[in-house]
């Protein structure tokens, strides 16, 4: 692709930088939590694949891939000393080409999920899964439009930022708006509108919280509705502001008619651009967003009997029983209530839906006691 000796002379051996340094402690923390949350997200991923829910599966898959990128890159580019850097050949060609298609696929999944849930809430029967159309909706544009045509507006093959790793860079032409940026701008308000409609659809189902939430005949239904409420509120309160910040930060405010297409086959286009931390100090913390998504998915979908059996087997296969003997013993039963009492284990508080269920049940009992 390019002359490595020329690359080393012009890019790697740059002396005299005396600016802000990459936060190496942050990099080590990202590596540790990326591994943990990837393992946490594996069970929901396999569950969504078995249930053929394309939107949720794609969401988790993209989050896991980005976490893998963060895990690899934080361990390679953990310094501002360009002389010690790996040039990124091969690895960055793959990562830089996939980042934008995966980002748009994630945004499309965030549109599809509330859309399918709205249809489910408004239907008296369970809608049949439309796997092929869902796959085309989420992955059609990223794979068949953005992936091949993004090279028309990329300023170079890839760039590298300390602590974050490989990134693509796009010019500020109108063509770049059509190929890259327009999807971020269009999909965000669509997601917001669908989330609002989803809240209305949930409310119209008239969930009756007067039914005891720990009753076996109703707990499954109540947990399902609570999940829907939390999902809708989470999209509006968390995802929308984060994406809006992302758009404000990365989308150019002005566009021109000049494109970098004419220099794509030149030597300058094939040379990567190496940055220092001071060029963008905040980007090294961006992988925490993927880690948070994996943890949220785990706390949202990971607290089932099958999930705990899966995680327990992973701990046993890793040989952690030699360090923690309790792991080699029979798997404990994780439940919201311990022996019928209101006490809860520490891990049960990670169960987001179970935690909300317990709070609502306590509130209901308090209202009943005050009434009588």
Image: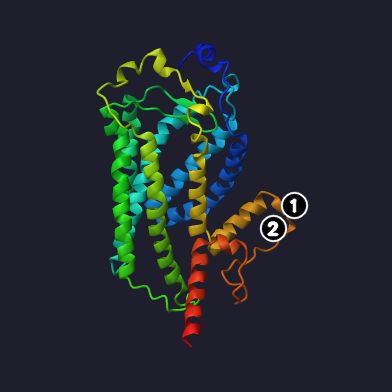
Q: Is residue 133 visible?
A: no
Residue located beneath label 2 in the image? 327
Whether 183 is drawn above or below 293: the answer is above
Q: Quadrant of residue 124?
A: bottom left
Give the residue drawn at x 52%, y 25%: 276
Is label 2 in a helix, a strand or a loop?
helix
Whether 290 is drawn above or below 214: the answer is above
Q: Is residue 84 left or right of residue 46?
A: right
Q: Is residue 76 left or right of residue 262?
A: right
Q: Is residue 347 visible?
A: yes
Give the residue drawn at x 42%, y 18%: 270
Is label 1 in a helix, a strand or a loop?
helix
Dot 1, crowdedness within 10 Å: few (<14), some or many (≥20)? Answer: few
Q: Hey, which residue is sitting farthest bottom in the picture?
A: 372
> Earlier along the polypeptide chain: callout 2 or callout 1?
1
Where does the image place residue 51, in percent across and percent down from the top left?
A: 41, 57
Q: Do the residues under discs 2 and 1 have CB atoms within 8 angstroms?
A: no
Whole-angstrom CA distance, mark 2 to mark 1, is 9 Å
Dot 2, crowdedness within 10 Å: few (<14), some or many (≥20)? Answer: some
- The disc placed on residue 152 is none
Residue located beneath label 1 in the image? 322
How is this picture coloured? rainbow
Where does the image place residue 208, in percent across and percent down from the top left?
A: 38, 76
Where does the image place residue 72, in percent across and percent down from the top left?
A: 56, 35
Whether 372 is drawn above or below 163: the answer is below
Q: Quadrant of the N terminus?
A: top left
């Amino acid at each position: 692709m390019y002359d490595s000796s020329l690359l080393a002379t012009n890019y790697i051996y740059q002396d005299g930088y005396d600016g802000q340094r990459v936060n190496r402690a942050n990099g080590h923390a990202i590596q540790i939590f990326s591994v943990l949350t990837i393992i946490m997200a594996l069970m929901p991923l396999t569950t969504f694949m078995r249930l053929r829910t394309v939107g949720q599966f794609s969401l988790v898959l993209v989050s896991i891939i980005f976490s893998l990128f963060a895990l690899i890159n934080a361990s390679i580019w953990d310094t501002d000393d360009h002389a010690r850097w790996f040039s990124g050949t091969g690895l960055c060609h793959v990562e830089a080409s996939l980042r934008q298609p995966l980002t748009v696929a994630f945004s499309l999944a965030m549109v599809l999920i509330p859309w399918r849930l709205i249809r489910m809430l408004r239907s008296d029967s369970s809608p049949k899964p439309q796997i092929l159309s869902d796959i085309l909706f989420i992955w059609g544009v990223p794979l068949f439009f953005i992936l091949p045509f993004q090279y028309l507006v990329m300023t170079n093959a890839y760039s590298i930022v300390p602590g974050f790793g490989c990134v693509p860079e796009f010019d500020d032409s109108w063509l770049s708006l059509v190929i890259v940026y327009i999807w971020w701008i269009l999909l965000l308000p669509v997601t917001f509108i669908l989330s609002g409609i989803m809240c209305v659809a949930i409310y119209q189902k008239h969930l009756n919280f007067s039914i005891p939430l720990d009753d076996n005949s109703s707990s499954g239904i109540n947990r399902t509705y609570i999940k829907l409420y939390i999902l809708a509120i989470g999209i509006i309160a968390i995802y929308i502001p984060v994406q809006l910040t992302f758009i404000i930060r990365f989308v150019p405010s002005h566009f021109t008619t000049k494109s970098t297409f004419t220099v794509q086959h030149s030597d300058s286009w094939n040379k990567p651009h190496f940055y220092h931390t001071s060029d963008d100090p905040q980007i090294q913390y961006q992988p925490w967003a993927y880690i948070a998504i994996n943890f949220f998915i785990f706390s949202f979908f990971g607290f089932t009997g099958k999930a705990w059996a899966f995680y327990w087997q992973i701990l046993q296969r890793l040989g952690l029983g030699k360090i923690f003997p309790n792991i080699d013993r029979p798997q404990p039963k994780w439940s919201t209530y311990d022996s019928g009492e209101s006490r809860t284990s520490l891990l049960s508080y990670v169960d987001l839906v179970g935690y909300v269920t317990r709070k609502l049940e306590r509130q209901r009992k308090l209202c009943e006691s005050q009434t009588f």
